[in-house]
């Protein structure tokens, strides 16, 4: 290959393939910062072609793009500009050909991110010369000059070569302003971890119950959280979205999965983390309990494969992967007995001896060990079909079936204060995601249509691994001694001194159990018009969500309750539901007008039961969104964005009746300026209003017919001593006389504030970025958010629960809610 003269952006010899191979590892993240389109699954390359000698724009220049799934071509316009849109995430080469010369100029290693605009300019010699090829050495900087979005993008190379945890949810903490909450969720930019949206190949895979994803906690029940070996690119977007995107007050996490290409590729992998590579966890002693516990890992093994390639070259491609993961650990419960050796007079004084720091002195007397195992079997497959050069169909299916046997998570340290059998939980969780995306470009590529269909499905179930505990009542013992429940040597009382006190000890049956099936059917349709220097985009998004949840306290049929034992008192909790229009305060003792309160706590004979053995809440939500936005480029280095988004969420209760309808209007306004005029810098600012999509737990709990009746008994009246109770049903506490009964929650629907507003905040972002080298982008940004309204459940003066905007309720509305 012959080569001719070149300026400082080209090289005369072969490409220095190795030149940046040893660049700092973190550059893989830095070079991609802010290249973030929240729910976009494709990107674009744009640029300007000039004469290398005069700097004048060149029209009619042939531009050919080559990627993993074939080639594409276009011509530069009268301004010397070219534009490739709807590009799959990955690396590309762009070549420029002059019709009057044999000269060819080449731009290699252009990395396209989802939704990002990559600018790649070229200077081309126009004079007739011998055949020559210019390979532009200077790489296009990864500065997204098309948007003001904030965030971080992690590419496949980073995930492959940098030691990380194994799912995309674990990598979210790489984003500035992200931190881990105690719930296992990730907070972004000050919002809670339940206010993010998670999108995979254009499909909303956010958890339906709470709005989270499956995380490292063993009982996590959220949305899909794929293995990194299935992912080509991960974007964590922390602010500044255009009108095309919404539904989140935190961040929008965009996942692009791998695809097939014209070359067969694949990998087999094994990740193994043995216990001896983990630091021993710290055991934290408790002042008020003889029981403490700690998890210790045994191993974490993740293995599998992924493979992709052509079925028909340049036409039809496949990808598939399978990745089992086994995580084994043990939970150790320690019994530490307090000692009473000396008092002020040198003899025991029935009080625990204290050390110099005022902590009880203890002696370790017993350790029990519980095996824990979490197994997941992630799978995925994907087909790309190029029907024609401007028409593409992509379909995929992914699944994350998971089962776990573990010690359930309670309040910090609370899982230790229990019978070891009671503390164990068996959990089954399965998420399935099906996507279909169609893209067409029409009218000389001045109109682009994007259509998508998808299904996100979740199933969840929990119970005790011991069959007998699923048929008994759970019992809580407050202010008890361990010796009352477990015959452990060294815990026997010494006079009035208790060496092994415990607080809130659990035994008996499993307690409240839950299962659900959720389906989210999604449809999207977008149209993009290129008119002069305007890119006008409009679209509609629809979701139909069904959430079928069943909850109950374990125990015999007719006696499914939770039993709490306090010194001198026993409280028995049970579920009840009320007819429409009825409220708990209408049920009092011996009142035949509305019914007696005893009807709430036991199945009446020959009547419709208000007491419920289980609560079945089949609820649904219909979410729609409409948007229009215009991205204007008055000159090549300035982009202004105007947009408006309207979101509608309608929720339905367990009877099928509408209880909430929120209409949310969110404007967007932004500007991006590139001082370098070559895609290597930007100064940006944007304003927007963002609303949260309310998760289905609100409907299932507060509009799912849940009422809780608490019967309080005087334990001194029990003819069957509580020490004999095993959780076998109401025959145990019925021996304790007549209880006083209180009712909580409404047993039906909460009253809803008239003209309630959706939860939202306003946001301003501003900042700058500059590419110092080909692989290093530096910048600074500012984010200011202020809360407009929140949606909360609260309690009126008579104990009735309501749904409202706190701080925004007028007195007459509050009086109406209370009535």
Image (tube, rainbow, N blue to C red):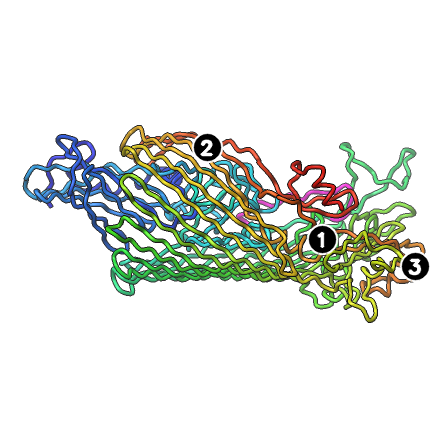
Q: CA distance from mark 1 to mark 3?
A: 40 Å
Q: Is residue 109 magenta?
A: no
Residue linked to disc 1:
367
How many other residues sit within 10 Å of disc 1, few (<14), some (14-19) or many (≥20)? few
Tell me where the magenta segment starts and ends, as one range: 275-291
From this viewpoint, is residue 714 visible? yes
Q: Position of residue 21 (x, y in %)?
A: 30, 41
Q: Position of residue 704 (x, y in %)?
A: 67, 57
Query: Of the residues tagged 2 and 1, which is closer to the observer?
Result: 2
Q: Which mark is residue 315?
A: none
Query: Of the residues tagged 1 and 3, which is closer to the observer?
Result: 3
Residue linked to disc 2:
765
Residue linked to disc 3:
737
Q: Would you say the magenta stretch is mainly helix, strand or loop?
A: loop
Q: Earlier in the sequence, mark 2 or mark 3?
A: 3
Q: Position of residue 110 (x, y in %)?
A: 28, 44
How many other residues sit within 10 Å of disc 3, few (<14), some (14-19) or many (≥20)? some
Asked whether 659 or 70 is in front, the reply is 659
Q: Residue at x 76, y 65 (%)?
A: 555
Q: Residue at x 74, y 51 (%)?
A: 745
248 sits left or right of 409 in the view:
left
């Amino acid at each position: 290959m012959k080569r001719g003269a070149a300026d400082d952006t080209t090289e005369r010899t072969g490409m220095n393939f190795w030149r940046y191979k040893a660049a700092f590892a973190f550059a893989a993240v830095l070079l991609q910062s802010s290249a973030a389109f929240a729910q976009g699954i494709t990107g674009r390359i744009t640029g300007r072609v000039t004469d290398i000698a005069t700097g004048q724009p060149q029209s009619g220049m042939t531009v050919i793009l080559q990627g993993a799934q074939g080639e594409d071509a276009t011509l530069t316009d009268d301004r010397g500009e070219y534009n490739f849109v709807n590009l799959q995430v990955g690396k590309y080469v762009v070549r420029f050909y002059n019709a009057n010369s044999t000269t060819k100029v080449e731009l290699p290693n252009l990395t396209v991110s989802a939704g990002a605009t990559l600018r790649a300019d070229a200077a081309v010699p126009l004079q007739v010369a011998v055949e020559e090829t210019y390979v532009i050495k200077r790489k296009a900087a990864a500065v997204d000059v098309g948007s003001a979005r904030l965030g971080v993008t992690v590419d496949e190379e980073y995930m492959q070569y940098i030691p990380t945890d194994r799912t995309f949810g674990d990598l979210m903490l790489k984003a500035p302003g992200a931190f881990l909450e105690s719930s296992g969720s990730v907070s972004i930019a000050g919002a809670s971890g339940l206010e993010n949206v998670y999108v995979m190949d254009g499909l909303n895979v956010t958890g339906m119950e709470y709005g989270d994803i499956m995380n490292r906690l063993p009982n996590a029940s959220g949305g899909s959280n794929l293995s990194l070996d299935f992912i080509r690119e991960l974007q964590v977007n922390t602010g500044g979205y255009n009108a095309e995107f919404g539904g989140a007050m935190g961040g929008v996490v965009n996942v692009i999965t791998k695809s097939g290409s014209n070359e067969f590729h694949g990998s087999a992998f094994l990740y193994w983390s043995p216990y001896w590579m983990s630091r021993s966890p710290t055991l934290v002693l408790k002042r008020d309990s003889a029981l403490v516990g700690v998890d210790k890992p045994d191993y974490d093994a993740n293995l599998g494969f992924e493979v992709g390639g052509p079925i028909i070259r340049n036409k039809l491609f496949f990808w598939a992967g399978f990745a089992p993961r086994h995580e084994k650990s043990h939970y150790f419960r320690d019994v530490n007995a307090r000692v009473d050796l000396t008092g002020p007079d040198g003899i025991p004084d029935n009080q625990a001896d204290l050390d110099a720091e005022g902590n009880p002195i203890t002696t370790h007397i017993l350790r029990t060990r519980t095996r824990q195992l979490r197994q997941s079997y992630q799978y995925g497959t994907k087909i790309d079909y190029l029907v024609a050069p401007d028409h593409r169909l992509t379909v995929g299916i992914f699944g994350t079936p998971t089962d776990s046997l573990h010690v359930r998570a309670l309040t910090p340290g609370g899982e230790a204060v229990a019978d070891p059998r009671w503390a164990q939980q068996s959990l089954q969780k399965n998420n399935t995601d099906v996507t279909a995306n169609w893209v067409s470009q029409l009218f000389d590529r001045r109109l682009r249509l994007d259509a998508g269909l998808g299904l996100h499905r979740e199933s969840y179930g929990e119970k005790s691994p011991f069959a007998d505990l699923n048929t008994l009542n759970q019992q809580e013992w407050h202010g008890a001694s361990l010796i009352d429940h477990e015959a452990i040597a060294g815990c026997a009382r010494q006079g009035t001194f208790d060496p092994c006190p415990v607080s809130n000890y659990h035994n008996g049956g499993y307690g409240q159990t839950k299962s659900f099936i959720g389906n989210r059917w999604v449809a999207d349709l977008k149209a993009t018009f290129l008119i002069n220097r305007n890119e006008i985009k409009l679209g509609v998004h629809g979701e139909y969500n069904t959430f079928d949840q069943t909850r109950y306290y374990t125990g015999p049929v007719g006696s499914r309750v939770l039993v709490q034992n306090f010194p001198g008192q026993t409280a028995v909790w049970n579920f009840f539901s009320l007819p429409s229009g009825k409220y708990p305060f209408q049920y009092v003792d011996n009142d035949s007008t509305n019914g007696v309160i005893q009807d709430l706590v036991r199945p009446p004979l020959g009547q419709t039961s208000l007491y419920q053995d289980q609560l079945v809440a089949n609820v649904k939500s219909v979410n729609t969104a409409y948007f229009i936005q215009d991205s204007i480029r008055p000159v090549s280095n300035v982009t202004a964005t105007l947009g408006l988004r309207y979101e509608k969420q309608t929720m339905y209760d367990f009877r099928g009746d509408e209880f909430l309808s929120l209409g949310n209007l969110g404007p967007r306004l932004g500007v991006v300026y590139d001082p370098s005029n070559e895609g290597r810098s930007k100064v940006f600012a944007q304003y927007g209003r963002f609303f949260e999509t309310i998760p289905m737990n609100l409907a299932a709990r507060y509009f799912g017919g849940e009422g809780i009746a608490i019967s309080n008994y005087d334990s001194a009246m029990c003819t069957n001593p509580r020490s004999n109770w095993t959780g076998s049903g109401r025959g145990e506490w019925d021996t304790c006389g007549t209880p006083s009964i209180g009712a909580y929650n409404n047993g039906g629907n909460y009253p809803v504030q008239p003209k309630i507003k959706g939860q939202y905040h306003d946001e301003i972002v501003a900042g700058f970025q500059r590419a110092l080298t080909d692989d290093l982008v530096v910048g600074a940004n500012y984010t200011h958010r202020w809360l407009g309204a929140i949606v909360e459940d609260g309690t009126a003066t008579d104990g009735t629960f309501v749904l409202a905007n706190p701080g925004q309720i007028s007195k007459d509305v509050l009086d109406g809610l209370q009535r």
